């Protein structure tokens, strides 16, 4: 198997989700640290525009979004599974809720002034300003949910999670699945990065016990890799074959067209390229850059928009 390279930074909750999935599957991986804010020249040299964290690279294949990364890792190493039989739909639905509603409420709560002071303890004032400006631009200027509203929402969500843990060690049964890793990561940020605010978890001790169980899964075995090495590997590799992928056309856009793919909510930096595959669940673009060589950049369909570039 080619090396798995995760482009991420330590404090990213979504990266924590993938690090734990790598641990769950006991995979070895290489770790490239990327900046927390734009510009991210090495990352976007690979993705062609997409800037979110994390991104998985396997040679000249670049996988964007943690839902797709989960699927790719499942394909590479099916056991232990992320999708226990008959629970795949439920696991994906809980994960989607956790990655959106739960994440939004948790981060709005975590980023109240006490939390910001802990996250940026020791960092220069300019770093804090740069982060706030970057994330405001990423939300296209929209305000975050007020931390007071977020606190009440977060507490309700924590009670729902506690309810799911009645009589079982994990959210959907006796083994961890995608739902657990997605639900864990916003809570991990509260406990790990903003401990001054972690008292919110005290009302649901079963959630804290479950978090200890998930943390114990660990991150698998990783070794450091530089962004330059990762780019060199992309240049020296060929994208995996797409033979056998079945085309599903929803947009009236033929394979071979020049297109743009972008996230549909925030962080809208698009990736341009040639549409070389569009299956039931994902898109693949071929693009060539000086630093990356020819790569295939893959996106899930859910959460992304596809548009044809007008000639
Ligand atoms: N839907 C995406 C969301 C990823 C996401 O929002 N990640 C945050 C970090 S936890 C991010 O990209 N923040 C801005 C950045 O890192 O540039 C996924 O599942 O991968």
Image (cartoon, rainbow, N blue to C red):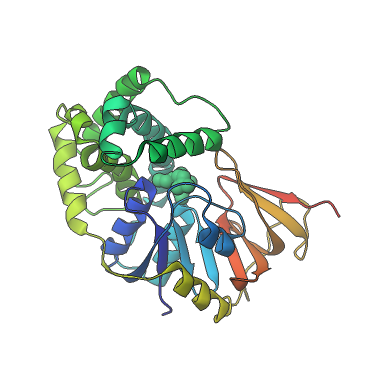
Judged from this view, the residue extending furthest toward the top is: 148
Residue drawn at x 29%, y 57% is: 20
Q: Is residue 305 above or below residue 224?
A: above
Q: Quadrant of residue 187?
A: top left
Q: Kindly tell me whether residue 166 is visible in this rendering.
A: no
Q: In the visual, does 279 lie left or right of 40?
A: right
Q: For the N terminus, which image quadrant?
A: bottom left
Judged from this view, the residue extending furthest toward the right is: 311
Q: Is residue 116 above or below residue 178?
A: above
Q: Kindly tell me whether residue 67 is visible in this rendering.
A: yes
Q: In the visual, does 65 lie left or right of 210?
A: right
Front in this rendered view, residue 221 or 279: 221
Q: For the C terminus, which image quadrant?
A: bottom right
Residue drawn at x 30%, y 39% is: 120
Residue drawn at x 45%, y 67% is: 227
Q: Position of residue 258 (x, y in %)?
A: 76, 59
Q: Position of residue 286 (x, y in %)?
A: 66, 67
Front in this rendered view, residue 240 or 243: 240
Residue drawn at x 70%, y 62% is: 275
Q: In the visual, does 139 lie left or right of 79?
A: right
Front in this rendered view, residue 84 or 299: 299
Q: Quadrant of residue 197?
A: top left
Q: How many marks?
A: 0
Q: Position of residue 229 (x, y in %)?
A: 45, 74
């Amino acid at each position: 198997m080619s090396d798995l390279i995760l482009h991420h930074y330590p404090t990213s909750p979504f990266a924590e989700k993938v690090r734990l999935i790598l641990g769950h599957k006991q995979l070895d991986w290489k770790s490239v640290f990327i900046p927390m804010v734009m510009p991210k020249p090495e990352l976007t040299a690979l993705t062609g525009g997409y800037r979110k964290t994390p991104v998985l690279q396997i040679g000249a294949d670049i996988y964007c979004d943690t839902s797709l990364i989960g699927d790719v890792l499942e394909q590479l190493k099916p056991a232990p599974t992320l999708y226990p039989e008959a629970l795949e739909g439920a696991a994906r639905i809980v994960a989607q809720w956790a990655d959106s509603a739960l994440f939004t409420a948790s981060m709005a709560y975590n980023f109240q002034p006490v939390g910001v002071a802990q996250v940026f303890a020791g960092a220069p004032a300019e770093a804090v300003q740069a982060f706030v400006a970057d994330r405001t631009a990423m939300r296209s200027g929209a305000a975050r949910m007020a931390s007071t509203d977020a606190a009440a929402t977060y507490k309700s969500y924590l009670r729902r999670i506690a309810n799911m843990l009645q009589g079982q060690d994990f959210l959907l049964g006796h083994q961890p699945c995608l739902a657990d890793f997605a639900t864990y990561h916003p809570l991990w940020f509260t406990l790990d990065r903003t401990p001054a605010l972690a008292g919110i978890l005290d009302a649901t001790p079963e959630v804290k016990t479950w978090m200890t169980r998930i943390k114990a899964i660990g991150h698998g075995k990783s070794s450091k890799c530089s962004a330059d090495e990762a780019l060199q590997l992309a240049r020296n590799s060929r994208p995996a074959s797409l033979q056998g992928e079945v085309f599903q056309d929803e947009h009236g856009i033929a394979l071979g067209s020049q297109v743009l793919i972008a996230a549909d909510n925030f962080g809208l930096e698009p990736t341009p390229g040639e549409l070389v595959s569009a299956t039931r669940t994902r898109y693949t673009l071929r693009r060539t850059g000086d630093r990356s060589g020819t790569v295939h950049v893959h996106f899930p369909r859910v959460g992304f928009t596809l548009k044809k570039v007008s000639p």
